[in-house]
Image (cartoon, coloured by chain):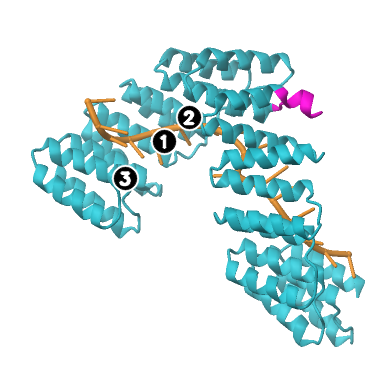
Amino acid sequence: WSSYNLMIKMLGQAQHLGEMEQVLHEAQRKGFNMDVVGFTVLIQSYGRAKKTEAAVGAFKRLKDSGFEPDLVAYNCVISILGRAGDHEGVRKIYNEMLRDGKEPDVYTYSSLISNFGKSGKVDEARNFFEEMIHRDITPTVVAYSALIHAFLYASRVDDAFEIFQDMKGKGVEPEAWVYNSIVNGLCKAGQLDKAYELFEKMKEENRIPPDLVTFNTIIDGLGKAGQLNKAKQLFTRMKGQALVPDSITYNILMDAYRRAGEEDEVHRLFQEMSSKAVTPDLVTCNIMIDTLGKAGRTQEACSFLDKMTNQGFSPDVFSVTSLIDGFFKAGEVDEACWLFERMRRKGVEPNVTLYNALIAGLAKRGQMQQCFMLVQEMEDKGWVADMVTLNTILDGLCKTGQVREAVRLFNEMKRKGQGPD
RNA sequence: UUUGUGUUUUUAUUGU
């Protein structure tokens, strides 16, 4: 059986499910009886191929063949159902497992915590963590990390930080990426000082010094908070520590200067990239287009778009939105509409933000009928108007003297429970 | 022979 299991596993991992099933039939024809491990290999193979139903089917066959699933089999099914977002299924199997008298282990809990966390059910994730402790199971770095990520995913940085401290206190060493996640969470929550403090403490607390991602994260946090000088200082410092800035580092800095309206510095950094042989990526291009557009240099933005296309980049919805917005702000409405059409022919799918940019441009010109048509078109495509859409339309109505209409829409949205913000 | 944590960092739209 072990050779057959190995074959099945290899074929399953290579996503050759047809051949995998052939081997399975051959084994059965030759009189090999499947054992629990064999079924588990099969379940796992289906799981990796995202064939959740087939995996569950194999689990059923395991039980129908008179076997009792062992802990590993249960863990596999729980993990697969969790990844598929089937929390009811997860609960069912978990309860079944307890009824069978199988003690969950740290693998079971890590999987449960991660999957519930990822679907926004942080409190349930935490409950599983506590249940694990009550069972006297010592959390590993994996279990801790899963819970920390569950909290960060729910924007609960303080809770994440508490677990992070607890983890270190228990002598479990976080890996660099957990530090980085926490630093990022703190930055995004506006707790820049705390983020910076942790960043500085990294090397003494842990044997792992801040890496490229840590620097990028903290530089971005500083840049978004408008602390450009400090950001630039760290940029210098990272180079002194033998870290090589990548395109993301440059994008972060360019974006910071773009926000601050320091257009020249954006262009200088773009030049510096090529002199340092850092290859620009799509985000770099998009920042350049946005910078040019916001400066009213729409022709240059337009040729930048053509140039990047010739160099093999496919402009995405970000590139197009920036350029369309630039056109509108420069009063070039026809060009904006032309680009929108061209984009659709090229197969770039518009999203809510792009529609919002169009609506804002037309609203500013008082073309409210066209705005409503776009909202209709957007909703026909299955997009849901967001708060920016509503605010844009309300502003447009007010500025065109249709205040009563605006109030009516305002009340209607309020009744539907959509805003106001 | 089979199981667990990895968007860790960057870009667009409204309100002046």
Mark 1 residue type: Ser
> Which of the chains bears the disc numbered 1?
A
**How far apart are labels 1 and 3 at the CA level?**
22 Å
Task: Determine the image quadrant of residue A202.
Answer: top right
Q: What is the quadrant of the N terminus of chain A in the image? A: bottom right
Residue to which mark 3 is pinned: A387
Q: Which mark is residue A196?
A: none
**How far apart are labels 2 and 1 at the CA level?**
8 Å
Q: Is residue A404 visible?
A: yes
Label 2 sits on a secondary structure element that is helix
**How far apart are labels 3 and 2 at the CA level?**
28 Å
Mark 1 vs 3: CB contact within 8 A: no
Q: Residue furthest right?
A: A2
* Coordinates of residue A110 in the picture (x, y in percent): 72, 56
Mark 3 residue type: Met
N-terminal-most mark, 3 or 2: 2
Task: Determine the image quadrant of residue B2.
Answer: bottom right
Q: Do the residues at discs 3 and 2 belong to one chain?
A: yes
Mark 2 residue type: Cys
Q: What is the quadrant of the C terminus of chain A in the image? A: top left
Q: Colour of chain A?
A: cyan
Label 1 sits on a secondary structure element that is helix
Residue to which mark 2 is pinned: A285
* Coordinates of residue A76 in the picture (x, y in percent): 74, 66
Residue to which mark 1 is pinned: A319
* Coordinates of residue A100 in the picture (x, y in percent): 77, 78
**Front label number (3 vs 2):** 3
Labels in figure, total: 3
Q: Tell which of A239 and A36 is nearer to you.
A: A36
Badge 2 density bin: few <14, some 14–19, many ≥20, Cα 10 Å: many
Q: Residue at x 63, y 61 (%)?
A: A83
Label 3 sits on a secondary structure element that is helix
